[in-house]
Amino acid sequence: MSYTYESYDVIVIGAGHAGCEAALASARLGMKTLVFTVSVDSIAMMPCNPNVGGSSKGHLVREVDALGGEMGKNIDKTFIQTKMLNMSKGPAVHSLRAQADKKEYSREMRKVLENTDNLTIKQGEVAEVLVENSEVTGVRTTSDAIYPCRAVIMCTGTYLKARCIYGDVSNYTGPNGLSAANHLTDSLIKLGIEVRRFKTGTPARVDKRTIDFSKMEEQKGDENIVPFSFTNSPEDLEREQVSCWLTYTNKETHKIIMDNIDRSPLYSGNIKGTGPRYCPSIEDKVVRFADKERHQVFLEPEGNYTNEMYVGGMSSSLPEDVQYAMYHSVPGLEHANIVRNAYAIEYDCINPVQLKASLEFKKISGFFSAGQANGSSGYEEAAAQGIIAGINAARKLQGKEPIILDRSQAYIGVLIDDLITKGTNEPYRMMTSRAEYRLLLRQDNADLRLTPIGHEVGLIDDERYNKLLKKEELINKEIDRLNKKTIGARKEVQKLLEENNSTLLQSGTTMAELLKRPELSYDILETIDEDRPELPDDVKEQVNINLKYEGYIKRQLRQVEQFKKLENKKIPESIDYDEVYSLRKEANQKLKEFRPESVGQASRISGVSPADISVLLIYLEKLERTKIGG
């Protein structure tokens, strides 16, 4: 017998990284929000790697923070090591990465959720999303309880019909042995939603006391701490950091794997789900890259109060005995005690092309989806989708237009556009190479790009927004000063140039022109700039980058102008593609299937050619003229 409980504005299914951001955004925007989790102890759990950020992923975390999300603040509270990656390259690919204390990360995020107004946490499994006349009306749990609501956000992660596998062992559980969500998939299929089977995996955890670190290379954190959250300063985050360690596989490791490859469920056919291309298991790496004699292995601490170490780079689903032999062949791990076996996990997810750019299902009003349920991988990708889904669910109920970030505005825009326009046949991972305008979408300027949007939405308060405006004013004022300040070939100037292997001046120039030289920087020029004002480090950083890369930035801005023209050309929902004569058959079929919201989005659909876009533009212009004329 079912019981109906109090109604909510928004119900979030799942309290992982997507669910936390979705629930917080919804509640902070005034929506009465209920978040379901299979276990309250698993809120913001990190079932795989014990870190946040990394190449391109660090961009996503800072963008979430700039919009008013929580992930950046939470990792700043709980990191045990922090490092800026790719510093030998240009600023477009600099990415912050922090090792987390897993338990503390989860505990702190749970504390935030528990103390947020309008937000209720409920332990339970959602079995069905209730829909009437293509509109969400509520959810039903496995205990047959019905919770009415006006919007649902699905953030189920890797829990839908999850199965953990290593060797011949197959456990029908979610990550870390938690209960799987075995009923919701049937509800999705009943609603006409296309479901897929994906696979990911995790390496073993070993006891720190049984590792010989003398055979490994120590990997220390950065002395100069850079916060993830724009609300924090480096001084706020000073603490003793914990080291990670680097070692390598070898020929013996690879022989053990190849001698037992037929026992791997990946190759025996026991695993049906599609795995991630850019984060393969160690057996997959050894098979695919047979020419490589070794692969990197990182030993990463799981926290301050545990001896468990994460064996990064050696994800596997091989049998237990093979795992022991394989790990013991790695220098430093010869006597390592495995605390938790490595395993693969299969799970159900949706085909994301069924979603609008707002992350709402095209065919079901009020039903949103975010995170690994959409076929992506990673905590950061999940959080990014979560905050957008939470914002847009709230805005829908407020009668407002959704917030859509396009590819020229944010990595979040690239992530969501890739998923909903191109789809994915494997777990999608964000990479800097996916962003066409990455010089504009740097992690250091995420606040300048997105905090105004967060303020407009209502997740950024006036105090934080006014600080941003002040920062912007200081940047512009200093750039203007440097463009106007001329400097001659005086003795101290020539000496500084000589010391930095820079061409000596033949005549006067501006400070801005000097700054554009690759070997010079804003800080290096300080001694010859007597008018230089006292400025915060983040302002100096923006001045340095904006002037040094001015030519490239202007070029990308021109490209963005062209991109925006197609992006702003909206396609009516009611369009009949059969009436768009001269469209190729494949393009007609794809446009009917995807129902793109703009010409820009249509141009990125596989199977739609530039010629098809030209035909579509001509048709839309005719439509527009008909409207004006009649």
Image (cartoon, rainbow, N blue to C red):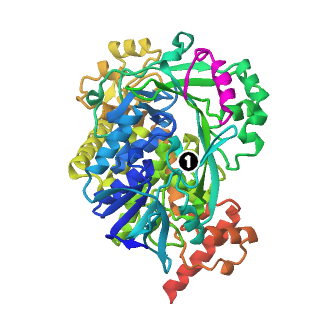
Vertical relation: 579 (above or below) 103: below
Residue designated by label 1: 173
Vertical relation: 532 (above or below) 566: above
User: Residue 408 location, x and y as percent?
Assistant: 49, 52
User: Residue 37 location, x and y as percent?
Assistant: 42, 53
Residue found farthest to the left: 463
The stretch of residues the image draws in magenta is 317-339
User: Residue 19 location, x and y as percent?
Assistant: 42, 53
Quadrant in which the N terminus is drawn: bottom left
* Side of 142 where 274 appears, left or right: right
Tell me, yes or no, whether the highlighted magenta stretch contains residue 279: no
Q: Residue at x 69, y 27 (%)?
A: 322
The answer to whether any part of residue 360 appears in the image is: no
Q: Amino acid at mark 1?
A: Thr
The front one of 236 and 148 is 148
The front one of 137 and 411 is 137
Residue found farthest to the top: 214
Q: Residue at x 52, y 67 (%)?
A: 361
Tell me, yes or no, whether the highlighted magenta stretch contains residue 320: yes
Image-quadrant location for residue 476: top left
The front one of 239 and 19 is 19
- Crowdedness of circle 1 by 10 Å Cα count: few (<14), some, many (20+)? many
* Side of 52 where 206 appears, left or right: right
Image-quadrant location for residue 607: bottom right
The answer to whether any part of residue 242 appears in the image is: yes
User: Residue 347 location, x and y as percent?
Assistant: 60, 51
Image-quadrant location for residue 249: top right
Q: Residue at x 47, y 15 (%)?
A: 501
Badge 1 marks a residue whose secondary structure is loop
